[in-house]
Amino acid sequence: MPPSKPYVPRRPSCPTSLPIRGLRYHVHHWGSPEWIGPDTPALVMLHGWMDVGASFQFVVDAMASQRYVIAPDWRGFGHSEAPQADSYWFPDYLGDLDTLLDQLLPDQAVDLLGHSMGGNVAMLYAGIRPQRIRRLINLEGFGLPASRPTSAPKHYAAWLDELKAPQELRPYPSLEAVAHRLRKNNPLLRPEFADWLAPHWARQREDGQWEILGDPAHKRRNPVLYQKDEVLACWAAIAAPVLWVEGDRTDVAKWWGDRYPRADFESRLQVVRQLERRVLSPAGHMLHHDQPEALAAHLDAFLA
């Protein structure tokens, strides 16, 4: 098979660095703040676990509308600074997002998009700060299985045990090996996309190996049990119209088995007051990589 042509972004991002709650945050910007208007607020994109803000490049390139887009690297991911901590707490993402919006877009409502973990953050934030969100897009931010209080002792014990073991992310011998890993994880990923993503997803160490741009501490479980009732209270408080998008090849049973049946998720969505749904095909969990053109068309229509 001949090598694929290198991917060349149509709208390159302009990264900046911001102080966010004691950490240096790496933030991608596409377009200009001058494009913000009453019907075209800034579009903020939140990436998922073990991903980076640059991951949205293909969708931004495919959008027909002229929008000012912002995508941060979450704390401990990409080029954002990692805290001096041994585990991560979900409310910190809410605090970081709130601070970022206050700094870059004070007193403005925004359009908010989140993928996977970022989708979960977006849904919570939209219910906590409903006045800040005009439109909300959730790309497969399913949430987590409901927890039982009786599981707390074993859950905390497992977390304590994890604290005693150092977490590691395996290195790769070359940038080509990183791209291969990306395609192995997602067979639908186009080769030119994988090649472009690889240097944004990893960096070369002094020994020549390539390491993933993610704090290994992210691999530790969250010590606080997932509180379904609290999450649904936030979802029910969302005032903005919500667009839910998923891939036709995503199977939540592969992640959680019978701990989180599809019927449970469908019942959760019922609390969202204004909901539209779309399914992309063929697409898996990384649907913004698998079908950026189709996703961009849905975004253009929903955000118009």
Image (cartoon, rainbow, N blue to C red):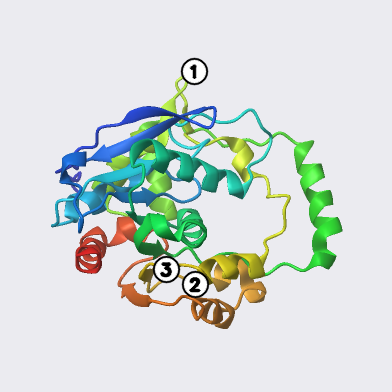
Q: Front-most of 88 and 7?
A: 88
Asked if residue 148 is positioned above or below residue 69 in the image, the reply reads below
Amino acid identity at mark 1: Asp
Asked if residue 267 is positioned above or below residue 11 in the image, the reply reads below
Q: Name which residue lies at 46% across and 67% down.
A: 238
Residue 267 point in image, percent of width and height: 55, 82
Q: Give the quarter of the figure containing the C terminus.
A: bottom left
Q: Which mark is residue 170?
A: none
Residue on which disc 2 sits: 251
Q: Name which residue lies at 23% across and 50% down.
A: 60
Residue 88 point in image, percent of width and height: 63, 42
Q: Which mark is residue 207?
A: 1
Local SS, label 3: loop
Whether residue 32 can be seen here:
no
Image quadrant of residue 248? bottom left
Amino acid identity at mark 3: Ala
Whether residue 231 can be seen here:
yes
Q: Name which residue lies at 18% across and 51% down.
A: 37
How far apart are the alpha carbons under marks 2 and 1?
39 Å
